[in-house]
Structure formats: structure tokens, C-alpha cells
Amino acid sequence: MARRRGIMSEALKWELAKELGVADTVATEGWGGVPSRQCGNLVRLAIEKAEQALVNNQS
């Protein structure tokens, strides 16, 4: 089975991690070291940014 390509770029993930204050954890422990609550917050922030980008493109 083919592997799906990630939707979020690594640069975007790092930017969001910095905004949430978990970039140091990612740097030392990798993404597996980030608590699931923080990962959920990261996804929520990514969705908000994507929705905002859609609104800006439609205007």
C-alpha cells in the first residue's frame, strides 16, 4: 500500500510548535515526545490558519 504524502510541511509544523512552546520538546525528543493534548492544539491551530487563508483568498 502506498504511503500518503503529508499535508502539513515540516516548516509549518515547526512554526506551529514554536507558537505553542513545544519546539524544544520536538528538538530533543522528537514528535513522539509531545503530549497528545499539545498535538491536538497544534492541529487546531493549523486548521484555524488554513481557514483564515481560505477566507483571505476568497475576499
Image (spheres, rainbow, N blue to C red):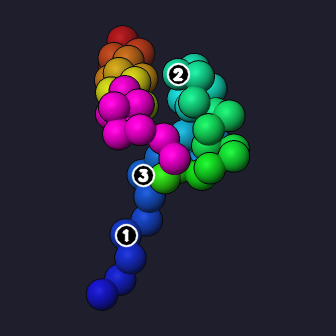
Callout 2 amino acid: Leu
Label 1: state its secondary structure: loop
Q: For marks 2 and 3, give the one nearer the viewer.
A: 2
x and y percentages locating residue 33 in the rendered image: 51, 47
x and y percentages locating residue 14 in the rendered image: 62, 37
Does 55 sit left or right of 26 as displayed? left
Q: CA distance from mark 1 to mark 2?
A: 26 Å
**Image: 6 above or below 13:** below
**Image: 57 above or below 1:** above
- Circle 1: is it few (<14), some (14-19), or many (20+) Cα within 10 Å? few
Q: Main secondary structure of the magenta part?
A: helix
Callout 1 amino acid: Arg
Q: Which residue is mark 3?
A: 7
Residue 55's label in the rendered image is none
Q: Which residue is mark 1?
A: 4
Q: CA distance from mark 1 to mark 3?
A: 9 Å
Q: Is residue 54 visible?
A: no
Label 3: state its secondary structure: loop
Q: State the residue at coordinates (60%, 51%).
A: 30
The residue range painted magenta reads: 33-41
Q: Which residue is mark 2?
A: 20
The image quadrant of residue 5 is bottom left
User: Looking at the rendering, in which quadrant would you find the N terminus?
Assistant: bottom left
Callout 3 amino acid: Ile
